[in-house]
Image (cartoon, rainbow, N blue to C red):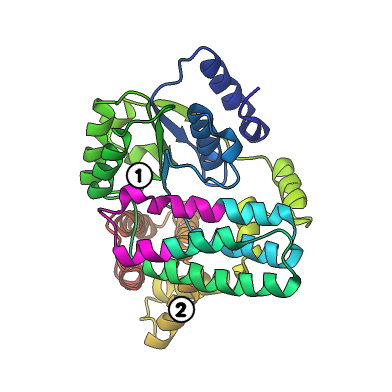
Amino acid sequence: MSLERLKRTQPHIAERLNEELEKNVVPQSIMFLGPSFSSRMSGAIELALNLLGEEEHYQALDVNDLIILSNRNHSLRLKALRNAFAAARNQKTWNMLLHETRLLLLSYHSALSQSGDKDTFKLAGDLSDLLYSYKSDMSQSEIDKFISDYDKALNALLNSSKKKSGFTIDQIRDVQAFLQLESKRGKAVILENIEDVTVGAMNSLLKLLEEPMDKAYLILISKDQSRILDTILSRVRKYEFNAIDSALTQGFILDSFFKKSSLSLEEFFYTQAGFDSDKLKSYVDSFFEKSFVRREHQYYEDLNELNSFLEEFDTYSLFMRALYEKVQEKALYSHDTRAMKVLKSLTTMNIDSSVYNQNKKIMIDRVERSLRFE
């Protein structure tokens, strides 16, 4: 049976896809729907490699016929995996770090260089070269130096690409050109969180779906299909992922990080990366109390401190989610009509920030005013 990794997390989807693979009826346009940390990306990668006959390259993702435009918090995941590797220094933790780093680098595939920033692509190349320098028989001092060099190369790339959000119209054009290139087994493209892109980029994607090319596979990943054009939804076959149950999550954490934990996988990654979730809760409570309850202006120094905290791990979305839940609780249990208005504003601002790549500090200012004046 193929798709062994997906079988462990989403057995019903793995079974369905395996049947389609055996009958050679896997569609060229696919959508994986479900919450974050439900193995949508790992499943998409495993399926794409199967279709391309490159299953053995899952760990290193050294595949020329695959592009992944990932739209996720790479900083969080890579810091967590980097810390695990620095502590354990074994092949298992290296493989996880290598895989996630290569996943990031496939957003800088050479086929996308025409529409990309040259300096950022150069930094991606530097990080890629560094990965190839790692050897399993390195001494402890050599591993120390490698980790230091990795940190510098990764931070340089992440800082250079901070202002970028979901994929662009130009990138879709590059993807189309890439899919038209000849290949023995075909080509595959994975687009993550497509709900977080502009309508213009979605329209470009629609044109690509309307005229599928021979042996070209497109796998879309989404957690909110309500924000995707109906014309796109009608042209893909959907596979719905469930949240991974706690027993499986705890087993993965113990097996991969050698720690027992009752946290969700997302919460564990934040903790492993060094993120202080208690401090976030304190910021959310204080922000809500001062802006919404007392309708007082946040001090400039307090906003600067908050932004610095959120920037370190790129956790603005986590702050917005926690604040939304705080306001939602007020709206539901107190039947507060003002809270209902604020909820609508927060939803709009969060979408605008993702889609139009709004400056996060400006977003926090807008949120603060909304809580005070709605």
Q: Position of residue 270 (x, y in %)?
A: 60, 62
Residue 198 seen: no
Q: Quadrant of the N terminus?
A: top right
Q: Relative to residue 45, is residue 358 drawn left or right?
A: left
Please name the residue shown 50% across and 67% down the image.
154
Please name the residue shown 75% across and 55% down the image.
261
Is 104 in the magenta?
yes
Front residue of 251/27: it is 27
Q: Relative to residue 295, is residue 14 drawn left or right?
A: right
Residue 102 seen: yes
Q: Is residue 309 above or below residue 334?
A: below
Which region shows up in magenta?
Answer: 100-124
For residue 155, the mark is none
| Residue type, mark 2 in image | Ser
Q: Is residue 247 above or below residue 216?
A: below
For residue 308, the mark is 2
Q: Position of residue 252 (x, y in %)?
A: 72, 46
Q: Relative to residue 308, is residue 363 drawn left or right?
A: left
Disc 1 is placed on an element classified as helix
Q: Which residue is mark 1?
A: 195
Front residue of 315/151: it is 151
Overall secondary structure of the magenta stretch? Answer: helix
Front residue of 24/242: it is 24
